[in-house]
Amino acid sequence: MTLLKRTFTGFLWNSAGKMLEYLLLYVITVFIARGLGLYQNGTYATLMSFAQIVLVLSSMGLETALNKALPQIEGPAAPSRIRFVLLRALGTRIAVFILIAAILLVAIKVLHLTSAASLSEYLLLLLVYACVRSITTLVSTSMTALFRTDIVSIVGVGMRAIELTIIAVLSAGGLSIHALLILFSLTGTFQIVLSLLLLRRSLLGGLTSQSLRPLFVFGAVYWINSIVDYFLGRHGDVLLLATLTSDSSQASTYDVSFSLVQLASMALTLGFGGITFATFARLALGPAPAFDQFYAFLLRILSFLTIPLFAFLAFNAGPIISLLYSPAFGGALGLVQGMVVFKIGSRLFGGGVNTEYLLARGRVGWVSSAGVAAAGLNIVLDVMLIPPFGAFGAVLGSGCANLLVNALTRILVGRYSKIPLPFASWTKMTVAALPMSWIVAVLFSSDDPISLLSRIGVFGVGIILLTAILKPFNRDDLMVLAEASPWLAGRVQFIAAR
C-alpha cells in the first residue's frame, strides 16, 4: 500500500469516526448548555479551561512529538522500538502530570486561590478528570500516528455515545457540574483500558532500546507552542473572560459561539487530524517536490471543505443558536459572525497546515517563536478589549492573533517552498459561498426548523453548482487524489480546471 493510499484509508476511518464522535460531542455540549443554563454553563466552561491549562502544562509536547517520530521508525526492529518509545512516553506523561498537580495544589493552598471560579468546590474532581484526559489523548495520538485510526474511531464513538445517553437521562432531572466531571472521568478511564486492550499486540513483547533524546527535545520545544495555543484558542479566552469580567454569561456565550464555529471548521476535516502530519513526517524523508505537492493540495482542499460552512454561519447562525441552545444564548450570534470572518481570512494563509509542514521539517523552534509572538498579541488585546467589549473583545483579540500566527508561519514556509498562496482557490470559494449564504438567508427568513433545513439544502446545491463553474481544483490536485483513490478523483473531476 502506497503512503498516499495508506493516508487516504486512515483518513476515511478518521473521518467516519471523528465526524461521528465530534457530532456526538457537540450534541453533548448542547445538552450541557441547556441543562446547566446560561450562567452555570459559564462556570462549567471556565472549569474546563482551567483543566485544559493543567493538561497543557503537563503535556511536554509528547503528542506532537510522537506523531512525528513514530511514522519515521522503520526497519526489522521497528515494532520493538516503537513499543519502547510508547511505554517510555506513557510513563513520562504520568510522572509529569503528578508533579504538575502537586505543584498546583501547593500553590493554590499557599496563595489562597481557591475562590476563583468555585475552584475549591471542584478542584480534586478536576484534577482526576484532567489526569484521565491526559493519558487518553496520548494513547489516541499514538494509535493515529501508527495509522490505527480504526481503533481510535470505534472506541471514541462508543464512549461519546455512552456519555450522551447518560447525560440525556440526567438532563431530565437536572444536570450538575459534579455529575459531569465524575461521568467524564469514568468514561475516559474505560476508554483508556479498552484502547490498550485492543492495542495489546503493539504493547506486549520485547523492547529494543532507542534514543529518546530527539523525542523529548522536540516535545520540549513544542511544549512552548502548546502553551501558546492555549492562549490563542478557546480555553485561554474563556479563562481571561472569567478573570476580567464578573459576568459568567460572557464566558458562556463565547463558549457556545466557539463550539458552533469549531463544528463548521471540523465537520469535513476531522479525518485529517494527525493523519496529515504523519504523512508529512514520512514525506519529509523523501524528495522535496512530493512534499510540496502534498502541501499545495492540502491548502486547496481545506479551503474547499471549510469556507462554505463558515460562510453559511455568517448569515444563518441565528436560527441554529436559537433552536439548539434556546433564545437565552442569542448574544452568541454576533460572536459567531466575527469568528467566521477571521476563520475565512486565516484559510488564505494556510492555517494549521503551515505548522505541520514546518514541524515535519524539524523547525519546531520557528513554530514556537511565531506562536509566542501571536500569543503575546492575543493577551495584550484581550486585556485591552475584554473590559469594554466583553466576549466580542475576546473574538477580536484571538482573531487578530491567529491571523498573525498564520501569516508568520506562511512566511517561514516560504523559506523552504516557492508554492504561492492559494489565492485563486480561496477567492473562488469565498466568492461562491458568501453571496449564496446571504441569498438563502433572504429567501428563508423564518427561524423554524423547516426553514433552516431549506436554507441548508438550497445552499448546498448552490455551492455545488458554483464550484462546478469556478473550478477551485487543478490537474495536480486530481493527480494527488487519484494516487490515493482513483474512484474519488473520478467523482470530483468536474470541479477541477482542465
Image: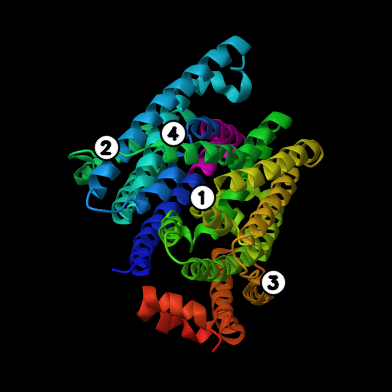
In the image, taking residue 161 as reference, residue 326 lies left or right, namely right
What is the C-alpha distance between the residues marked 1 and 4?
Answer: 40 Å
The numbered disc on residue 362 is 1
Picture residue at 30% right of the left edge, 35% below the top: 87
x, y percent for residue 179: 42, 30
User: Tag on residue 193?
Assistant: 2
Residue 348 placed where, x, y %?
A: 66, 65
Counting residues from the N terminus, which is met first, the one under dot 3 or under dot 2?
2
Circle 4 sits on which residue?
180
Badge 2 local density, few (<14 within 10 Å), some, or many (20+)? few
Q: Is residue 392 above or below residue 13?
A: above
Residue 8, compared with residue 52, is above or below; it is below
Can residue 245 be seen here? no
Q: Is residue 44 magenta?
A: yes
Asked if marks 3 and 2 touch (Cβ < 8 Å), the reply is no
Mark earlier in primary sequence (3, 1):
1
- N-terminal label among 4 and 2: 4
Q: How far apart are marks 3 and 2 (CA)?
A: 48 Å
The residue carrying pointer 3 sits among few (fewer than 14), some (14 to 19) or many (20 or more) residues within 10 Å by Cα, namely some
Q: Is residue 19 above or below residue 369?
A: below
Give the magenta range: 31-52
Tag 1: residue type? Gly
Q: Residue 375 location in percent, x, y? A: 68, 41
Looking at the image, tell me whether mark 1 or mark 2 is earlier in sequence order. 2
